Image: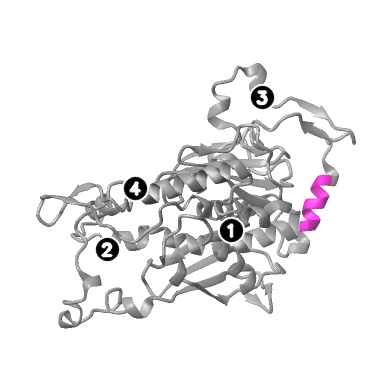
Amino acid sequence: MMRWLTAGESHGPALVGIIEGMPAAIEISTSDIDKDLQRRRLGFGRGARQNFEADKVSILGGIRHGISQGGPIAIEIANSEWPKWEKVMAADPIAENEIANLARNAPLTRPRPGHADLVGMQKYNFEDARPILERASARETATRVALGAVARAFLKQAVGIEILSHVLSIGVASIPEDAQLPTPIERDEIDANPVRCFHKEASEKMIAEIESAHSDGDTLGGVVEVLAFNVPPGLGSHVHWDRRLDSKLAGAIMGIQAIKGVEIGDGFTTAKRRGSVAHDEIEKNSVGKIVRRTDRAGGTEGGMSNGEILRVRAAMKPISTVPKALDTIDTATGAAAKAINQRSDVCAVPASGIVAEAMVALVLAEAVLEKFGGDSVTETRRNFENYLAALTIK
């Protein structure tokens, strides 16, 4: 069984992730993980913190000489700013006289609307938002991206699945509905785009949206789409709600900070269509393979992958740390106040696509292991090839 876990706080000494259940013989190295973490830092509209919160990756266990060993894989992402926070975020008690006058240690009692601050303070009975925002921070997603890099390597090496994301919209700027889907060949081209958008004209409009929001002291959200190619039919199951592939994907994507909506394929647009034009009709292609004529369902039917391109969309709300701070209350006094204004980005939609890629990779890796799992990549690949060869309906 595959399972994974992250630990750590935004300004703690490090973030740590552990993934268990990955087979032996996955080719993966620190540089591979670094590449995806660098991609997570991409995007026009990111704040200054991206320049100094460098991701320093260390593989602590489970990999030897670039090859997974079959045991749990542990990854650490060190915080380069830790010396500034060593006393404020220390695990052990610190003498009051050592931290009383530190500005970073001042209680945060003006919770931000749209953030975990207030409800977290209420749930865990804290008078200060620091213990909440440190863990609720999207900084935690760096660990997910690192673990997702392991899952991504396994998927490609074992069954040939490749995963890509691109931005569909930022604010009111969006790509045309009939825009061409990118393929893995265009990954570098997408990453080189300031907003990770594959459509040139839409990209320019998105940049203008971000510039306008920055001038107004505001923030922006948007929509990203994750595409998974070469997904075989039969991942997931229709027999229980918690084994349905689309259910697992939706839950994983909704678990990303600031994501407020998920759709598989055309999702909400399909809800407006009549049945005669909503579903993907079945035919044989020029080489006699059974395919869907369209991909409105986004690669899933009945809770299972159907062999078409898997398409998952995520709607990200505007960042809740708004420079022109929103109204709130000071929980220490009960008086009206302006919300905490921590440093942040104007727009993190381009980066959210990388996090969403990681979550899709982790879900698909679990599904592949459930279906074809072996103790090594070689065994998994053999099981996969035997499955394809044994399909009676091709």
Quadrant in which the N terminus is drawn: bottom right
Label 1 sits on what residue type?
Answer: Met
Q: Mark 4 points at which residue?
A: 216
Name the quadrant containing residue 128: bottom left
Question: Percent from the top left, x then y, of residue 384?
Answer: 77, 52
Q: What residue type is labelled 4?
A: Asp
Residue 224 appears anywhere in the view? no
Residue that numbered label 3 is attached to: 279
Q: Which of marks 3 and 4 is in front?
A: 4
Q: Earlier in the sequence, mark 1 or mark 4?
A: 1
The residue beneath circle 1 is 2
In the displayed structure, 60 sits above or below 389; it is below
Of residues 176 and 319, the one nearer the viewer is 176
Which numbered marker is on residue 130?
2
Mark yes or no: residue 272 visible.
yes
Across the whole image, how many numbered discs are drawn on residues?
4
Asked if residue 382 lies in the magenta stretch, the reply is: yes
Q: Position of residue 44 (x, y in %)?
A: 50, 55
Q: In this view, does 119 lie above or below 8?
A: above
Secondary element at image label 2: helix
Camera-side mark, 1 or 2 = 2
Q: In which quarter of the image is residue 345?
A: bottom left
| Residue positioned 37% across, 67% down in the render | 9
**Mark with earlier residue (1, 2):** 1
Residue name at image x 25 percent, y 57 percent: 340
As rendered, which of 311 and 288 lies closer to the eye?
311
Q: Which of marks 3 and 4 is nearer the N terminus?
A: 4
Boundaries of the magenta span: 381-388
